[in-house]
Amino acid sequence: MNSRRANPAPIIDTRVIWAIALPAMITNVATALIGVGDMWIVGQLGDAATQGAVDVGAKLFAVLFTVMNFLKTGTTGLVAQAGTRLGQREQAAVLLRGLVVGFAIAIMLLIAKPVLLPLMLKTLGADGDVAIAARTYADIRYWSAPAVMANFAFVGFLVGRRRMREVLVIEIAYNALNVALGLWLALGLDWGIAGIGWSSFIAEFAKLGACAFLVSRSDAADLREASADRAHLSLAALRPFLSVNRDLFLRTVVLMVALAALTRLGAERGPVVLAANGIIYQLFVLSALLLDGFENAAQVLNGERMGAEDREGFIAYVRAILWRGFAVAGLLAILFAVAGRTIIESFAATGAVAHEASAMLPWLIAIPFAGIAGFVFDGVFVGASWTRALLVSMAGAAAGYVVLLWLTWPLGNDGLWLSFVAFLVLRAGLQMAQMPRLLRG
């Protein structure tokens, strides 16, 4: 990467880091809260099996759609690069490729539904009345797959164009509509769990309509020109897009297996440890949702610098985003150190669970520091389309994680969390080790 910057102006505008990161943080937390809203609504139905079914269904779609989130991430990086390299028409072409690939994925998911849906429900342990209710919910929500895939592409495009305020408004409106429809359909019309499924289905397609309206209003001409040129959707044009998204897909699968191992090995130590680890894990997820805002900033800003072949600006943004990320990680660590025990006790069902989770508090305090560099480097690598290197670093960290889990098993639950924290640090270390070579390339 060369530096073509010839003026003495500042290399970077650090204000734009917060302009991207803060809306992304709010969006992430708002999206996470929708699951809480669904659980509250279904709780009013007064049926344990139905509440358990919503939990199973939520986990099913968290797995299914999180794996497909590579479509949003890959689109963001490629759109950011295209903006400084080839202009808005190429950005529109990237969006079209994302929509085509997303539609193809949705078709495959719908074809696989008769086999995939029962298999996933069984894998998640749903049986009896819970399985029946979960199947009702999942059968409805599954058909939103085309809208979900298209929304990944649209949101990735908007983020890549720095249109974070629009993304924030869309996500908050989507979540509010989902909850409002859930209240009306599940409780007001007495549709029960089917109402929760239909609320998600309708809200997803409403979100698609909003995204399509915003993009068509501002980029209609570029989209028409890009779609008129068949070369933009040729196999040669799609190949880089598919390559990036393949690597991101595999990387996400490796990450999810690593997270699943945390739950599975905790379960082997008994229900108290499992419940305690569930609390620590949810607080880790909250930290990740907040710190992920810096990943979004890195995807966009480093993608733009990569497209402009501005090596100095690229490195400067990496440093600036890292410093700000570590500052927020420090605030989270202080919060957990001061109020962690109180937070844990408010979640714990029994005194034994609270005691076990509180014993893991030092690891919870360490997690924001252990994870932030990896989150930022994820964004850097996606923005630069270094997705093969990203996959290699994730696979290497996962291999080290497996070894550590074996070595630290005698340490009990502390060994499990030590291994997980080391996994986060090792992932960032492997990414950092590859950067000099990638920058020279």
Image (tube, helix red, strand yellow):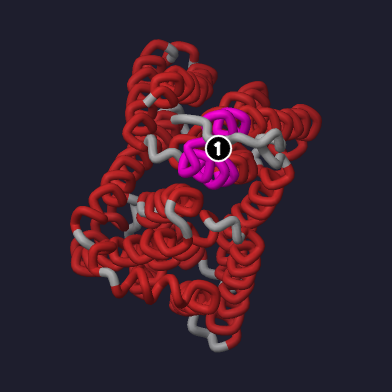
Which residue sits at x=45%, y=35%?
A: 381
Q: Main secondary structure of the magenta part?
A: helix
Residues 169 and 243: in front is: 243
Q: Residue furthest bottom?
A: 189
What amino acid type is highlighted by mark number 1? Answer: Tyr
The percent coordinates of residue 294 (x first, y second) are 61, 41
Can residue 230 be seen here? The reply is yes
Residue 9: quarter of image: top right
Report the span colored magenta: 296-317
Residue 129 is left or right of residue 348, and the answer is: left
- Residue 287 drawn above or below residue 168: above
Residue 363 is left or right of residue 383, and the answer is: right
Residue 353: quarter of image: top right
Residues 314 and 46: in front is: 314
Reading the image, the residue beneath label 1 is 281
- Residue 320 drawn above or below residue 89: above
Residues 8 and 364: in front is: 8
The percent coordinates of residue 134 (x first, y second) are 38, 66
The percent coordinates of residue 297 (x first, y second) are 59, 44
- Residue 436 drawn above or below residue 194: above
The percent coordinates of residue 386 (x first, y second) are 38, 35
Can residue 349 be seen here? The reply is no
Which residue sits at x=53%, y=40%?
A: 305
Q: Residue furthest right?
A: 338
Residue 362: quarter of image: top right
Magenta-colored stretch includes residue 208: no
Which quadrant is the C terminus positioned in? top left
Which quadrant is the N terminus positioned in? top left
Magenta-colored stretch includes residue 297: yes
- Residue 101 drawn above or below residue 398: below
Which residue sits at x=57%, y=43%?
A: 301
